[in-house]
Image (cartoon, rainbow, N blue to C red):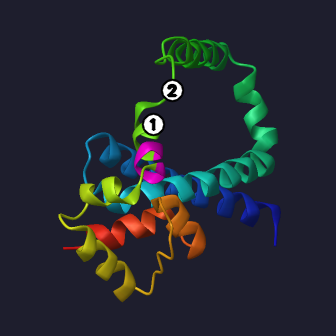
Amino acid sequence: MTKNQKRDIATSVTTLIFLVIGTTGVMMFFHIFDKYTKEMHEILGLVFIVAVFLHVFFNFNSMKQYFKKKTFFIISILTLFTVVMFVVNSPKGDNPKRLIIESVLTSNIEKSFLLFVDDMDFAKIKLEEAGIKIDGAKTIDEIAEKNNLSPFKIINILNLK
């Protein structure tokens, strides 16, 4: 493969993945199809990082010209300032979403199951039908561990109408 072909591939992949993660990022911001976009956005974000490194690697000589320009320097400073401002102004303390999730996953199943179904017996039946054994587990986390599953899989089963 020639150097130009590698550059073309790196640039094409970078551009196309950027379009997808940019679009899914905007969709997530406005909560459009969150259920479908979050995982794709996260995984393609990781692929995007690899694509950017390849793009920079194969195009570094031509990119060096940009790095020397005043415009690049100013935009770098503005970007750094913006990142620092987000970090400095981020909420302090524990993430409330994480606290809620941990509370649900570690609370007694009689309490946590009722968030997803109206009847404890019905919850047990749904889990048994899905091949999940409770076997004396006291929390969703324990059930997940005993069945070698994600606790979120348990919640999905309980939440199915």
Residue to which mark 1 is pinned? 99
Q: Is residue 23 left or right of residue 17?
A: left
Percent position (x, y) of residue 136? 50, 71
Q: Quadrant of the C terminus?
A: bottom left
The residue depicted at 74 percent of the width and 45 percent of the height is: 56
The residue depicted at 71 percent of the width and 50 percent of the height is: 55
In the structure shown, which secondary structural element does the residue marked by tag 2 occupy? loop
Q: Are marks 1 and 2 in contact (CB under 8 Å)?
A: yes
User: Is disc 1 surrounded by few (<14), some (14 to 19) or many (20+) residues within 10 Å?
Assistant: few
Percent position (x, y) of residue 157? 34, 73
- What kind of residue is marked 2? Asp
Of 28 and 118, the residue lying toward us: 118
The residue depicted at 52 percent of the width and 53 percent of the height is: 42
The residue depicted at 40 percent of the width and 40 percent of the height is: 100
Quarter of the image where one finds residue 99 = top left
Report how far apart the C-alphas of labels 1 and 2 lie in the structure. Answer: 7 Å
Q: What mark, if any, has residue 125 been given in the picture?
A: none
Of pointers 1 and 2, the one earlier in the residue sequence = 2
Residue to which mark 2 is pinned? 94
Is 105 within the magenta? yes
Is 81 within the magenta? no
Of 111 and 78, the residue lying toward us: 111
Q: Which residues are magenta?
A: 102-106
Q: Is residue 54 left or right of residue 114?
A: right
- What kind of residue is marked 1? Leu
Up/down of 81 relative to 155, above or below: above
Q: Is residue 150 left or right of residue 121?
A: right
Up/down of 97 relative to 35, above or below: above
